[in-house]
């Protein structure tokens, strides 16, 4: 039997429609409305009978839907795309465990916008804002897939999101002076008296110069094949994933050509020559046995040593202890490259293409503050706004009235 119940809480008075449902353990499902009129209209409209049964016999609970989404990501690929990589799948599984840890008191087909809002509140209470944002995004992906599969008629998570904090720190970008210091330090290490240090840094120096001159991701130049070093630039055709395996770049936009300065190309080619004729590796910067370098190994043996030698270290507290850590990461050279494109007044499309971003929104999200700053600097207002206002006050300036 269906009925309407009045509920009074912190948000005021609401009206809850209770109706029989075989899809729930209790045998009843619920819908909440702000007014009694809306509750009665729902009860009399016949919607109760439409919502009492799931659209799929195999996928009824929210965890069922999450598992179906994971299976599609792993074996089929969503929206006609390739299945996700092993590393990405592990990330999705981790997020799925968080989704499934929530107490879903409704069946999948009964979810409404307030239910997703409550889930969002739970995420923000128990996880960092960044983690909550990623999990909610994946849950939205689950619901969209359920719509595609015909399990849901509509997506109840439309327009529900977690925005970046207004206090989020912008990416750290080396200044021109600091970038110059990094490159000069790499030069010094490549010309070290110790032949073993010099040999290692002939490789690392070429990598660092290429990173600063192309904005490539570390995972891209670590997996760079020799045949992608072209006459006047480099082609990005593959990259390392989170599990250190080689595959396609992060997105289709990652497949790109980047022009490179002649000096940097000469350093890269000189390193290739130094490997000798016996070198059979297909990688531009191979490890000892011709394999590609793992990111963590480059970070530990190359980048951290470079930062230490350049004096670009800062004191941080880790597990209650103060330690010295690099100010910048290898990604900082990618951000430096983008900042130089902006200073050279390159258009947004060029910056987006060079950085390998899928859309301009991503470029603006990361570098929008730099673009706005550059635009502001170019506004010719030598006397400021106040001077112009006062100078036009009755045709006289304040200075003349003093």
Image: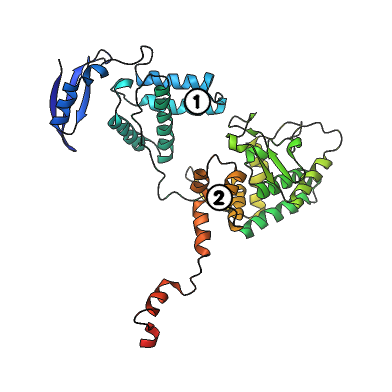
Left or right: residue 129 compared with residue 379? left
N-terminal of the pair, mark 1 or mark 2, is: 1
- Rendered-image quadrant of the C terminus: bottom left
| Residue 402 at least partly seen | no
Structural crowding at the residue carrying mark 1, measured as other residues with C-alpha within 10 Å and reported as few (<14), some (14–19) or many (≥20): few
Q: Among all residues in the image, which is located at the extreme right?
A: 277
Q: Can you tell which quarter of the image residue 392 is in?
A: bottom left
Q: Nearer the viewer, residue 163 or 178?
A: 163
Q: Nearer the viewer, residue 381 or 306?
A: 381
Q: Can you tell which quarter of the image residue 9 is in?
A: top left
Picture residue at 39% right of the left edge, 83% below the top: 397
Residue 149 image position (x, y, % from top left):
42, 19
Q: Residue beneath label 2, please?
A: 348
Left or right: residue 196 compared with residue 320? right
Left or right: residue 34 compared with residue 296? left
The Cα–Cα distance between marks 1 and 2, rounded to whole angstroms, is 28 Å
Residue 115 image position (x, y, % from top left):
29, 29
Residue 358 vs 3, above or below: the answer is below
- Considering the numbered disc 2 on the image, is that residue within a helix, a strand or a loop? helix
Residue 399 image position (x, y, % from top left):
39, 85
Q: Residue beneath label 1, please?
A: 79
Q: Nearer the viewer, residue 97 or 313?
A: 97
Q: Can you tell which quarter of the image residue 203 is in?
A: top right
- Considering the numbered disc 1 on the image, is that residue within a helix, a strand or a loop? helix
Residue 25 vs 359, above or below: the answer is above
Residue 330 image position (x, y, % from top left):
62, 45
């Amino acid at each position: 039997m269906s009925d309407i119940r009045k509920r009074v809480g912190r948000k005021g008075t609401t009206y809850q429609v209770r109706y029989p449902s075989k899809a729930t353990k209790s045998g009843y499902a619920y819908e909440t409305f702000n007014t009694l009129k809306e509750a009665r209209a729902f009860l009399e409209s016949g919607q109760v009978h439409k919502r009492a049964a799931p659209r799929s016999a195999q996928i009824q609970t929210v965890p069922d839907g999450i598992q179906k989404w994971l299976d599609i990501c792993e074996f089929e690929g969503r929206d006609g795309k390739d299945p996700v990589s092993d590393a990405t799948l592990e990330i999705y599984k981790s997020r799925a465990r968080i989704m499934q840890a929530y107490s879903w008191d409704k069946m999948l087909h009964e979810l409404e916008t307030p239910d997703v809002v409550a889930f969002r509140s739970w995420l923000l209470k128990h996880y960092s804002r960044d983690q909550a944002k990623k999990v909610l995004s994946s849950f939205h992906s689950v619901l969209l897939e359920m719509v595609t599969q015909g399990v849901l008629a509509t997506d109840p998570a439309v327009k529900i999101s977690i925005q970046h904090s207004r206090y989020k720190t912008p990416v750290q970008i080396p200044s021109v002076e600091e970038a110059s210091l990094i490159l000069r330090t790499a030069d010094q290490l490549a010309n070290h008296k110790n032949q073993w240090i010099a040999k290692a840094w002939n490789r690392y120096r070429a990598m660092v110069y290429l990173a600063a001159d192309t904005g490539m991701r570390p995972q891209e130049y670590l997996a760079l094949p020799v045949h992608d070093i072209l006459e006047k630039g480099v082609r990005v055709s593959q990259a390392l994933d989170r599990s250190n395996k080689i595959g396609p770049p992060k997105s289709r936009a990652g497949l790109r050509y980047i022009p490179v300065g002649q000096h940097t190309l000469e350093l890269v080619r000189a390193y290739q020559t130094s490997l000798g004729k016996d070198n059979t590796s297909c990688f531009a910067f191979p490890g000892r046995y011709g394999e590609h370098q793992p990111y963590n190994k480059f970070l530990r043996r190359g980048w951290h040593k470079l930062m230490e030698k350049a004096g670009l270290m800062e004191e941080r507290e880790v597990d209650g202890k103060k330690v010295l850590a690099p100010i910048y990461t290898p990604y900082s050279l990618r951000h430096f490259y983008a900042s130089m494109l902006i200073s050279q007044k390159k258009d947004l499309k060029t910056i987006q293409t060079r950085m390998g971003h899928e859309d301009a929104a991503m470029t603006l999200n990361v570098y929008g503050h730099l673009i706005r700053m550059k635009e502001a600097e170019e506004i010719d207002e030598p006397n400021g706004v106040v001077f112009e206002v006062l100078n036009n006050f009755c045709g006289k300036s304040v200075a003349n009235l003093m």
